[in-house]
Amino acid sequence: MARGMVTAGQMPRSAPPPEIDPATGRAIVTSFDVAAAAGVSQSTVSRALRNLDSVSAETRERVLEAAAQLGYLPDLRAARLRQATTGCIALVLIVPAGLDRAALNPFYYDLVAAIEAAAAAGGRRILLSFQDEEAGFDAEFEQRREADGMIVVGSATNTAGWAHFTRAAAQGRRVVAWGSPHDELPTVRADNRDGARQAVEHLFARGRRRIAFVGPGWERHAAYAERREGYLAALAERGLEPIDLSGASVGEREEQGAAAIAGLIDMLPRADALFAASDLVALGALRALRASGLRVPDDVAVVGFDGIQGVRHCDPALTTVAQNAPAAGRALVEALLRNIAGAPAASARVPVALVVRAST
């Protein structure tokens, strides 16, 4: 072989033709451009940007300086395809079909923030997706290499949405849920029964003996059903008779709470306390009680469930069983990450705490 000749396997890798950014009409800066500017090979640029030990500190600094001067942005999608993980979690928020997102239970937004914080603490990003209509349900984040798994949060009333993600889990997608209407998915829930027990104990200690439950649609809502079970068990322990004012699950939650008060007004003897399955239901009940001339808490004490921020400012401020959004966010992220790492996805419970305010 003549001096200076190289074999095909030794040939340096040449830069491909420049790719043009359609938005600007300018050539896109590539790792080959960075390599030329830094006086190194393209593979060295790749290793330097991944902070591998095979690149010296001096070379890495030269590569980083060239990349900064050229405005080079690594192709993150291509990098993810080379790696075993995307570093991202899909967070799907199932909302009732046709509902304005602003009308969604505010607790879900608290939970979204908590999940994002827990994911960030673990070095993960969140891909947020609101989904409501059957034609738009999407569980294929892993297949597109956009995320390593899904946390699905949302309203139990969107049964089609939950059915879609339940099928996706059965087909091997990594899914952990909050708010699922059933237990077919690995699900993190609040300790709903214990929260109801705390509410009844508090009302009993306040001298209330005719405690009504308001949870429209509890038959199809796992969390409401558990809260009702806890309510019934706590009454039975004290020899009290249950009073169910739940009614039909029609309209938004506040409307349902207001509708329940019509039954209370017609009742003789009248209930002297309400345990509402959610803060929104309780807010509707408070409004209707005030409109009917009944005083809260003098005539009727009211306890809600969720701990949303706004109930501190209603009139009177609402006593509520507060769900721990930060703990729930951590539990959801931890459950999904364990599943991504190969462990079976497991369900979990998050403690709740009674917050006493003026409504009782």
Image (spheres, grey):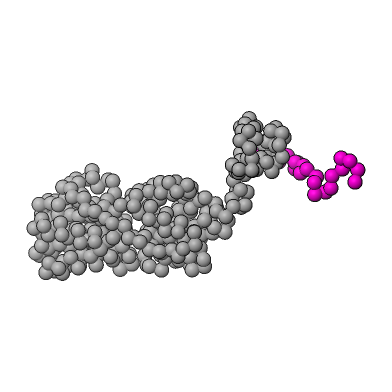
Q: Nearer the viewer, residue 133 or 38?
A: 38
Q: Nearer the viewer, residue 273 or 258?
A: 273
* Residue 56, visible in the rendered structure: yes
- Residue 307 % position (x, y): 27, 51
Magenta-colored stretch includes residue 14: yes
Relative to 264, 78 lies left or right: right
Residue at the farthest right position: 2
How many marks the image carries: the answer is: 0
Name which residue lies at 12% across and 59% down.
204
Does the magenta stretch mainly form a helix, a strand or a loop? loop
> Can you tell which quarter of the image residue 226 is in?
bottom left
- Residue 54 % position (x, y): 64, 43
Residue 309 higher or lower than 207, as above or below: above
Relative to 208, 142 lies left or right: right
Name which residue lies at 60% across and 43% down.
53
> Can you tell which quarter of the image residue 321 is in?
bottom left
- Residue 277 % position (x, y): 25, 59
Q: Nearer the viewer, residue 145 or 292?
A: 145
* Residue 74, visible in the rendered structure: no
Residue at the farthest top position: 69
Q: Nearer the viewer, residue 83 or 98?
A: 83
Name which residue lies at 90% across and 46% down.
1
- Residue 44 % position (x, y): 68, 41
Residue 294 higher or lower than 217, as above or below: above
Magenta-colored stretch includes residue 290: no
Name which residue lies at 69% across and 33% down.
38
Q: Which residues are magenta?
A: 1-28
